Image (cartoon, grey):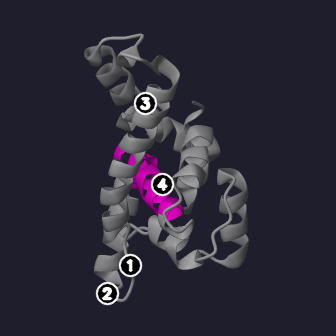
Amino acid sequence: MLNKEEITKIEKKIGYTFKDKALLKQAFTRSSYRNEHPDARDNEVLEFFGDMVLSYVVSSILLDRYTFRDDSGLVSYMQEDAFTKMRSNCTSNDYIAEKIRTLGIQDYLIMGNGDEKLGMDESDSACSNLFESLAAAVYLDSDQNLDITRAFVTKLLGL
């Protein structure tokens, strides 16, 4: 499990200090570890909600940057398919995994023996799951504050 020093390093790297450190620990805990330690909480449910949080935040950023409203309604600078492609690029496993690797926080993943043998700490899947889990953890830790979550996601994705 993560110790206080590791938690402090992670928080510094991600630019967010958790009130509830258990959420941060859970975001870093893979199901393979929980399988070996049944009392642990894994990041799967955080990953599920984080995927939605990430999609919403990125969509919101695109809405703000590439549309405006006038008397006739919403005016867009792009077609719907361009929005879809941009959101997909910003939320792809490759892209968000690279952002996690850039921070170097994948080294703190808490994994079971099976994952460690497979080198899962370096996989795109493990890294992107971590990012999604962190997005949900920040959202929950900030009392579901979308402004704080948006600032977190924007900074980490470089948007």
Q: Are marks 1 and 3 in contact (CB under 8 Å)?
A: no
The residue under label 1 is: 41
Kind of residue at badge 1: Arg
Which residues are the magenta region?
119-139
| Distance of label 3 from label 4 (alpha carbons) | 14 Å
Kind of residue at badge 4: Ala
Kind of residue at badge 2: Pro
| Distance of label 1 from label 2 (alpha carbons) | 8 Å
Q: Are marks 4 and 1 in contact (CB under 8 Å)?
A: no
Kind of residue at badge 3: Cys
Instruction: Locate the C terminus by quadrant.
Output: top right
93 with respect to 2 (left or right): left
Return the disc, 4 or 1, that comes first in the chain's sequence.
1
Return the disc, 4 or 2, that comes first in the chain's sequence.
2
The residue under label 4 is: 135
Return the disc, 1 or 3, that comes first in the chain's sequence.
1
| Distance of label 2 from label 3 (alpha carbons) | 34 Å
Work out whether 149 lies above or below 67. Answer: below
Of tags 4 and 2, which is closer to the observer? 4
Q: Position of residue 14 (x, y in %)?
A: 65, 52
Of tags 1 and 2, which is closer to the observer? 1
Return the disc, 2 or 3, that comes first in the chain's sequence.
2
Q: Position of residue 45 (x, y in %)?
A: 31, 66
Q: Residues within 10 Å of mark 4 (few under 14, many from 20)?
A: many
Work out whether 14 lies above or below 141. Answer: above
The residue under label 2 is: 38
Q: Position of residue 140 (x, y in %)?
A: 48, 67
Q: Which one is nearer the viewer's eye here, 123 or 159?
A: 159
- Residue lying at 45% horizontally and 47% vertically, measured from the top left: 122
* Number of numbered discs: 4
Instruction: Locate the N terminus by quadrant.
Output: bottom right
Of tags 2 and 3, which is closer to the observer? 3
